[in-house]
Amino acid sequence: MTNTSSSTNRLSELSGEGVSVWLDDISRERLRSGNLAELIAHKSVVGVTSNPTIFDKALKEGDAYDDQLRDLALRGVSVEEAVRAITGYDIRWAADVLRPTYEATGRIGGRVSLEVDPRLARDTERTVAEARALWWLVDRPNLMIKIPATQEGLPAITRSLAEGISVNVTLIFSLDRYRAVMDAFLAGLEQAAENGLDLSRIQSVASFFVSRVDTEVDKRLEKIGTDAAAALRGRAAIANAHLAYELYEEVFATDRWKALEAAGATSQHPLWASTGVKDPAYDDTRYVTRLVAPGTVNTMPEATLEAAADHAEITGDTVRGNYAQARADLEALAEVGIDYDDVVKVLEDEGVAKFEKSWEGLLKNVARQLGSAD
């Protein structure tokens, strides 16, 4: 049995290094049972992320949604509106649970993320319209709207921020795209300032995906089949994330940023996403312990959170000072035949497709449950 005190200490140590611990999961059962409040109190959790897969799973378990589904069925709402009502309800509740954290951290922590319909990932105008609708629906200051970092998503990010909507930028895989995301963030805040908005109330994180990079690169290394390729397994994701943090340090030291900071803005924190280990050969806390750096967020599935609480070895900053090694690792991968640009393109395309598939699954699940609730 896990010792509660030692678990708390490990996660507290992680928080003490400047890493915000977020839970990558939500369900109405977790909310009504008080489990989320418990994680906040005892496991250093200061934020929550969600996605269609998470909601689909929650709806398939237990009876927490039965009453609302029955009401929605009686009202004859569309399936898509039912999904918005169901997800909005949970996100609003979670935001209220995290509101004290939001206030205690000067509006930096205590955030809850809700994703726009991923089928809109290649449509700027509709993404902005959906972001506005979700922001209005949940109506909580500690909400973040998740917008994918596709080429079409970049202007949607800027426009949403310019209107005072806090944004969680998701599905970032490449360093070039991450730089473009930070530029979109700065442009959004500059426009928000021109619009007379209070910049201190606008928050953003940039969700840089981790484990999926190793999954894709390791698959390609295995196909190459040489000893040199085999020696590079598990190196890509950490190197990519370390260099992303180097970019973060570079951008948020510029005069452009300092002018916004002087006007009350908070930097867009890097968020490590996809931190659950996919390969059982790897330590189950590798994407926690090797991505420790100040000003970051690590959003963990519950299994990863519990593993980190139980046995993560927090040894201080494991990112800064490793940039040269990270560059060397990516160069070595290129030398054995790994095409970085192709890897990140495939991952973005697959990421959008997976999110779309999850959304379709959620719609079908809700449609089925609405029918059985009649």
Image: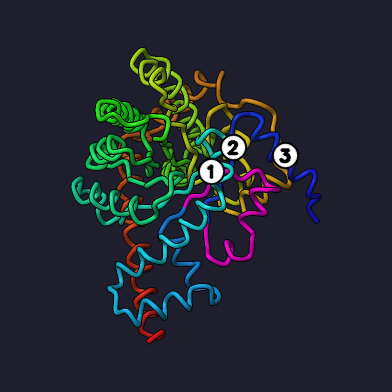
228 sits left or right of 84 in the view = right
Q: Which residues are magenta?
A: 26-49
Which quadrant holds the C terminus? bottom left
Q: Residues within 10 Å of mark 3 (few under 14, many from 20)?
A: many
The answer to whether marks 1 and 3 mark residues whose Cβ atoms lie closer than 8 Å is no
| Residue 260 placement: quadrant | top left
Using the image, determine if residue 115 lies above or below residue 176.
below
Using the image, determine if residue 309 lies above or below residue 292.
below
The answer to whether marks 3 and 2 mark residues whose Cβ atoms lie closer than 8 Å is no
Foreground residue among 1 and 18: 18
Write the residue at 20% across / 45% down.
124
Amino acid at pointer 3 = Arg
Q: Residues within 10 Å of mark 1 (few under 14, many from 20)?
A: many
- Let me know if residue 312 is in the magenta part: no
Real-space CA distance between mark 1 and mark 2, rounded to the nearest whole angstrom: 9 Å
Residue identified by numbered label 1: 110
Residue 294 image point, x, y percent: 57, 26
Numbered disc total: 3
The answer to whether marks 1 and 2 mark residues whose Cβ atoms lie closer than 8 Å is yes
Write the residue at 58% across / 44% down.
100
Which quadrant holds the N terminus? bottom right
Foreground residue among 238 and 126: 126
Q: Nearer the viewer, mark 3 or mark 2?
A: 2
Q: Nearer the viewer, mark 1 or mark 2?
A: 2
357 sits left or right of 221 in the view = left
User: Tag 2 or tag 1, which sits nearer the N-term?
Assistant: 2
Residue identified by numbered label 3: 10
Real-space CA distance between mark 1 and mark 3, rounded to the nearest whole angstrom: 20 Å
Amino acid at pointer 2 = Ala
Real-space CA distance between mark 3 and mark 2, rounded to the nearest whole angstrom: 22 Å
Residue identified by numbered label 2: 104
